[in-house]
Amino acid sequence: MAAKVAKGKTETYEIECPSCKTTKYRNPQMKLMVNECGHALCDDCVKTIFVKESGQCPECDMIIKRAKFRVQIFEDPLVEKEIDIRRKVGRIHNKIEDDFSKVEEYDDYLEMIEDLVYCLTYDQNKAETERKLESYERIHREEIKKNSHRKSAADEELDKIIEEEKLKYLQRLQEQRKEMEKTKQNSSSNRNTSLLKDLMASDGDASLIVQSHAKRLKMEKEGEEQEEILAKIEAATAGKNPKEFSSGVRIGVFGGAGKGDSAVAALMMQATDYEYESPVLSDRLPLPEWNDLQSAGYLAHVRQPGPAAHAGGYTEHYACMRALHEFMASHILHC
Ligand SMILES: [Zn+2]
Ligand SMILES: [Zn+2]
């Protein structure tokens, strides 16, 4: 049987935490975690919202346990929920084709399973469906137990889908890592010369420039620590053999509905929290007034526009002010 698992089409950089709206584009280290209700949260939000053992999902208010968050490997968190439900339903309705004398009966059986999965995934008649499932389990306990050692085609299909998705997830991690490696190489070669250059080129306060470099170095150091965590996740996930997947709840090292404290989730919790420090604003570099640009000699350093540009209303003040604003902005941000 082909499990009907929908696949998301979101680009990696568009992935967004529904709670704090952080995107992968703005924070490449962001990881989306998912819980049993199928709603995603970034790892930072999990840490902030779930300070205690359990709490309410911000999306659906369901009470969920912090330990049950796991890294979302499918781009669509609803698929994660569907996988868990398929596992659960498959453990109870665990017949295989050989159990049916007619192929039509087997088809009806599969259709009934699809209905159950649909209702539970999309919360349609959820309470009634769960009751139906529980009563079937109670009545057929012996039969379910007897059949539980067999692996159904649906189980194998699920294992395959998860395995493929896990590989794709690892590829995305590796690409991200390569990108970070490249940025790191560029920044470390620039790092040594840039302090000297800045000191030579600027008339500003030397202590402010040194301070800004120290801050940048600190940020780069934090980036490297994040990278180490990423490497640990890769090491924890890459070495696992696909055959270790069972038809049970546990989905490899990513954990499952019944196995919350996955290796990946545990590693994520080791990241240090971001601490906000107010920027040091320089009061020694006042921005000159528009009308003083000429008299103070600023305009002498800007290319003079031709008569055509003047006719259009342009004056060299614009270019001069823009350059000054850019300088001030970068100076403030780097302090
Ligand atoms: Zn978030
Ligand atoms: Zn939820």
Image (tube, grey):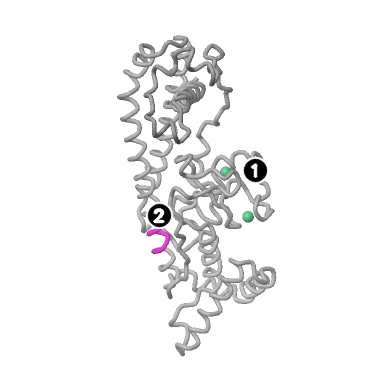
User: Depth check: 315 or 325 in front?
Assistant: 315
Q: Amino acid at mark 1?
A: Glu
Q: Is residue 207 above or below residue 236?
A: above
The residue located at (41%, 39%) in the rendering is 230
Quadrant in the rendering for residue 165: bottom left
**Residues rendered magenta in the picture:** 160-166
First in sequence: mark 2 or mark 1? 1
Which of the numbered marks, if any, corresponds to residue 312? Answer: none
Which of the numbered marks, if any, corresponds to residue 53? Answer: 1
The residue located at (43%, 82%) in the rendering is 98
On whether residue 162 falls in the magenta region, the answer is: yes
Quadrant in the rendering for residue 312: top left
- Measuring from the top left, give residue 182's x and y in whole percent: 32, 35
Mark 2 and ligand 1: say if the CB distance to the nearest ligand atom is below 8 Å: no
In this rendering, the label closer to the viewer, 2 or 1: 2
- Measuring from the top left, give residue 260's x and y in whole percent: 55, 50
* Disc 2 to disc 1, C-alpha distance: 27 Å
User: Depth check: 99 or 63 in front?
Assistant: 63
- Measuring from the top left, give residue 222's x and y in whole percent: 45, 28
Q: Secondary structure at mark 2?
A: helix
Q: Is residue 63 above or below residue 318?
A: below
Q: Which residue is mark 2?
A: 166
The residue located at (40%, 52%) in the rendering is 169
Q: Amino acid at mark 2?
A: Lys
Q: Is residue 335 above or below residue 86?
A: above
Badge 1 density bin: few <14, some 14–19, many ≥20, Cα 10 Å: few
Ligand 2 occupies quarter: bottom right
Compared across the picture, whether 302 is left or right of 256 comes to: left
